[in-house]
């Protein structure tokens, strides 16, 4: 099951940037735990990794469901002694036709459940496994829409949920620094995925690059920061 390979768990790895990140890290010798809400997309990603000779497994995890997160963490710890890397990638972009003056409260809550509250609870539930890794890394996949200068009234719930995710990154980094766990946010940019659409200027490989760099190459002293294209950017 990977032996001495480092273990990385990626939420929402059934498609898009999550799947591409899984492929790139598998090629770098990581054992990849592919998590998805539904079995089909997750097992498709696992099959793609194994077809290239990679080491991978699927784990059911719905970031909107506290019970699902707790069960996934329990099952993970039954199988593995530690978790070296956690990538909070699962997210939604649901604001079509809405604006800050029209967005309903339930819509805001649903977006925050996926984009902000889910990542926090995943960290909380997997913290024991991260601590056992010694020098673990957490990467939160954010957005330029989560920058203070990038907030748009036409993308209300997404912008605010990613702004809050960046705040969460700052708080987790401060809390976990003394334990040697690095926590950072990444902006992949506007990427050609199902979420980003076909007119996006960046390839999926470009979108995943900085995530992979933070996980596999960046100095572990880097924590509590926001990155795009391997460079620190403003909150």
Image: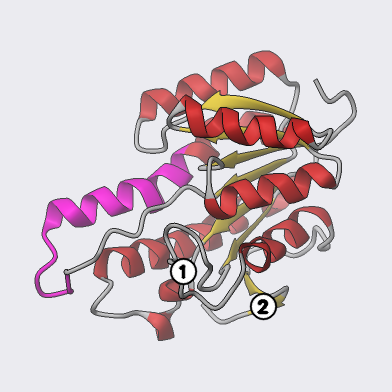
Q: Relative to 119, is 159 above or below?
A: below
Q: Relative to 20, is 7 above or below?
A: above
Residue positioned 90% across, 28% down in the render: 4
The stretch drawn in magenta includes residue 91: no
Tag shown at residue 145: none
Query: Residue 170: percent from the left, percent from the top?
Result: 54, 63
Query: Residue 145: percent from the left, percent from the top?
Result: 41, 74
Query: Residue 66: percent from the left, percent from the top?
Result: 37, 29
Q: Relative to 64, is 139 above or below?
A: below
Question: Is label 2 or label 1 in front?
Answer: 1
Closer to the camera in the image, 114 or 208: 208
Circle 1: is it few (<14), some (14-19), or many (20+) Cα within 10 Å? few
Q: Quadrant of the N terminus?
A: top right
Q: Which residue is mark 1?
A: 198
Query: Residue 51: percent from the left, percent from the top?
Result: 77, 32
Q: Residue 194: which quarter of the image?
A: bottom left
**Secondary structure mostly seen in the magenta stretch:** helix
Q: Which residue is mark 2?
A: 232
Residue positioned 35% across, 79% down in the render: 151
Residue span colored magenta? 98-121
Mark 2 and mark 1 lie on one chain; the one further toward the N terminus is: 1
Q: Relative to 25, is 34 above or below?
A: above
Residue 131 falls left or right of residue 14: right
Residue 203 falls left or right of residue 31: left
Closer to the camera in the image, 21 or 8: 21
Helix, strand or loop at label 1? It is loop
């Amino acid at each position: 099951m990977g032996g001495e390979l480092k273990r990385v768990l990626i939420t929402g790895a059934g498609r898009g940037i999550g799947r591409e990140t899984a492929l790139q890290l598998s090629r770098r010798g990581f054992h990849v735990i592919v998590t998805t809400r539904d079995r089909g997309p997750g097992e498709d990603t696992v099959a793609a990794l194994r077809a290239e000779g990679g080491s991978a497994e699927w784990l059911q995890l719905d970031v909107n469901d506290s019970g699902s997160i707790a069960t996934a963490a329990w099952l993970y710890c039954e199988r593995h002694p530690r978790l070296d890397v956690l990538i909070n990638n699962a997210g939604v972009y649901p604001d079509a036709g809405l604006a800050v003056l029209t967005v309903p409260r339930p819509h805001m809550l649903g977006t925050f459940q996926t984009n902000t509250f889910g990542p926090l609870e995943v960290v909380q539930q997997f913290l024991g496994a991260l601590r056992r890794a010694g020098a673990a890394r957490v990467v939160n996949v954010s957005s330029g829409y989560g920058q203070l200068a990038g907030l748009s009234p036409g993308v209300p719930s997404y912008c605010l949920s990613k702004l809050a995710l960046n705040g969460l990154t700052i708080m987790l980094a401060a809390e976990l620094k003394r334990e040697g766990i690095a926590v950072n946010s990444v902006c992949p940019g506007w990427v050609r995925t199902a979420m980003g659409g076909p007119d996006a200027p960046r390839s999926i490989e470009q979108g995943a690059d900085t995530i992979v760099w933070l996980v596999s190459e960046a100095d572990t002293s880097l924590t509590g920061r926001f990155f795009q294209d391997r460079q620190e950017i403003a909150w």
